[in-house]
Amino acid sequence: MDELQAKGACTYKEFEKLLGVSSMTVRRDVDMLAKRDALIKTLGGAQYSNVPQFLYETSLSSRIGVNRAEKDLIAECAMGFVEPHQTLFLDGSSTCIAFARLIAKTQLALTVITNSAIIAMEVGVSPSVKVICLGGEYDPQSASFVGVLTEEACGKFFIDAAFMSTKAFAPAEGTFESSIATLRIKQMMAQRSSKLFLLVDHSKFGQRALCK
């Protein structure tokens, strides 16, 4: 519970490594604590029960704690490509959430454009960051705005650098998404960016999803 409170979410594998116990022991204890409403079970792990309701009701919540160490390292690497006074686009991926938290800590003077409600709140805590949120129809699965209104808003901006993740990545073919709505937003913002950075951990390599 201390680890969950500190991190917000953990996978079963992270618990096994931390506690030096078997997978069955971890799953049994997580089930017991879930029945007490002390935590929330997610796909492949658990989440702290005091996390805001809007977060764990989405499928995004089950991904936030997965490969968290890798995502934090990717976020640190991505910061090396950020310069003061740039305009950035961040999508609503769990890797970009880690990146947004790091941006807020640096206190760099930036403009961040996003269609993600969570990203907007994460970077919005920094007084140095101007946040522009692309409005539209709210998609609870990604906690992001999509649809015609969002696409119209995309056409009004020029981006110095766009940072995005993806559902799957086959190097010889490109990126893949499971949601057509979010795919369209990413395509439009990629076309309006001077530079595009793909933030993906190893679990996405060699995988494919619905839309290329």
Image (spheres, helix red, strand yellow):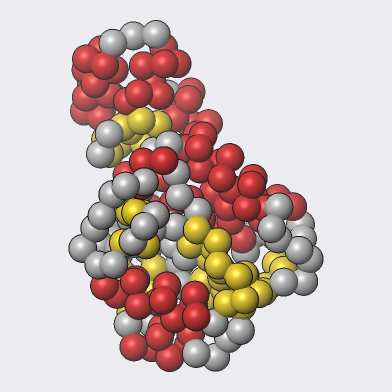
Task: Judge whether residue 71 can be spotted in this image.
Answer: yes
How many numbered marks, from 0 up? Answer: 0
Front residue of 52/7: it is: 7
Instruction: Classify the position of the N terminus by image quarter.
Output: top left
Image spot of residue 176 (x, y percent): 31, 61
Residue at figure coordinates x 41%, y 40% from the top left: 202
Task: Judge whether residue 120 can be spotted in this image.
Answer: no
Front residue of 187/143: it is: 187
Image spot of residue 106 (x, y percent): 74, 52
Residue at figure coordinates x 24%, y 21% from the top left: 27
Image spot of residue 61 (x, y percent): 35, 48
Residue 79 placement, left or right of 135: right
Front residue of 212/104: it is: 212
Is the residue 15 above or below the residue 57 in the image?
above
Is the residue 90 above or below the residue 151 in the image?
above
Instruction: Classify the position of the C terminus by image quarter.
Output: bottom left
Return the residue found at the far front. Answer: 172
Is the residue 183 above or below the residue 46 in the image?
below
Is the residue 187 above or below the residue 92 in the image?
below
Q: Which image quadrant for residue 34?
A: top left
Residue 161 placement, left or right of 142: right
Residue at figure coordinates x 50%, y 90% from the top left: 155
Residue 146 placement, left or right of 100: left
Q: Which image quadrant for residue 148?
A: bottom left
